[in-house]
Image (cartoon, rainbow, N blue to C red):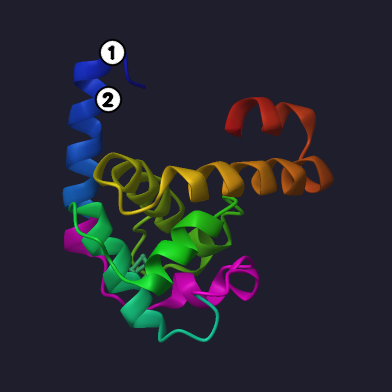
Amino acid sequence: MTTGHANLSELRESETARMLAACSECGACFDACPMVPYAPDARGAEKSEAVRGVLDVLTGGQGNAAARGWIAACTRSGSCNEACPEAVNPMLMLRLAKWRASETGALPKRDSAEVMSRVKVFARLSFTEEEQRDWL
Ligand code: SF4
């Protein structure tokens, strides 16, 4: 586990580099995501295009509408991790992309706040109190 900001920052950079190298852009994570049907910008998008957009956001770009909608809608179900054939950890990939997007402005803060409240409502319906403490 990490023990400080420097280590967290290093871990973030090394994880980002690992994901960029490992991801084949197959889109299996996008297909497996239970939130995509509820994200208007992501629903119906071409899966590899959505993944490419996430990778772009991860490296400081604006991505594309499908990627931004998907990132914003993520509730960390983990379904993507089970689907990924390359052990990328797409759940973490989306989390890191959301973090980067909040820094670059790729996701407006207003959207992030709306998404967070929706995430919390969703979480209360489906997650244990312990999971909510850990994740929210
Ligand atoms: S993260 Fe995994 S499942 Fe998603 S596109 Fe990359 S290789 Fe495929």
State which region is magenta. 19-41
- The N terminus lies in which quarter of the figure? top left
Q: In which quarter of the image is ligand 1?
A: bottom left
Residue with the mark numbered 1: 4
Image coordinates for residue 68, horizontal then vertical, percent = 40, 63
- 71 relative to 17 in the view: left or right: right
Q: Do the residues labelled 1 and 2 touch (CB within 8 Å)?
A: yes
- Residue drawn at 48 percent across, 73 percent down: 30
Q: In this view, does 64 lie above or below 132?
A: below
Image coordinates for residue 55, horizontal then vertical, percent = 25, 62
Q: Is residue 86 above or below residue 110?
A: below
Dot 2 amino acid type: Leu
Disc 1 versus disc 2: distance between alpha carbons? 6 Å
- The C terminus lies in which quarter of the figure? top right
Q: Is residue 4 magenta-colored?
A: no
The extreme right residue here reads 125
